Amino acid sequence: MRTNRILIWRFAAAPMVLQLLCEGSTNPPEWLVFVPQSMSAIDLDAVILRRAEPGRVAKYQTPTGDVVYVGTSNSSCLAEPLTLDKD
């Protein structure tokens, strides 16, 4: 994909070429995030993966250097209030 934006989809609505990255996954994904190479960074990994439970989020790197995250919701976190880190 050629874009300079982070794109987020419900998994079923994501482009098939991205869905195929996690073919054979044991947990059916619910969402997919595409991050172009120009925007990928360690701190973005921390934001996306920080509260993930093991097995709920997977990270894939495409041959072109783009990053794709796929995952399932953690319903126990959905009812928690949003907290902002103050650094």
Image (cartoon, helix red, strand yellow):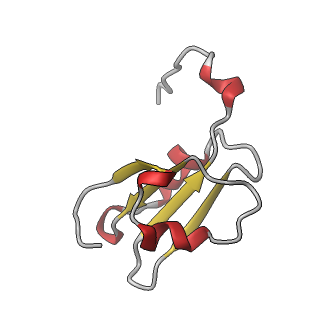
* Residue 72 at least partly seen: yes
| Residue under the image location 25 percent in, 56 percent down | 5
Q: Would you say 14 lies left or right of 60 here? A: left
> Would residue 32 be seen by someone viewing this image from the given angle?
no
**Front residue of 5 and 19:** 19
Answer left or right for 56 relative to 21. Answer: right
User: Residue 69, percent across and down?
Assistant: 53, 58
User: Is residue 74 depicted above or below 6 in this figure?
Assistant: above
Residue in the picture at 45% in, 85% down:
63
Q: Position of residue 19 (x, y in %)?
A: 51, 66
Q: Quarter of the image containing the N terminus?
A: bottom left
Q: How many callouts does the rendering have? A: 0
- Which residue is drawn at the image coordinates 35% and 71% (left, top)? 37
* Residue 65 horizontal/vertical position (percent): 41, 78
Decide: is 1 above or below 72: below
Front-most of residues 37 and 33: 33
Residue at 53% of width from left, 20% of height from top? Answer: 83
**Residue at the bottom extreme?**
63
Of residues 32 and 64, the one drawn nearer to the viewer in this rendering: 32
Q: Position of residue 36 (x, y in %)?
A: 33, 66
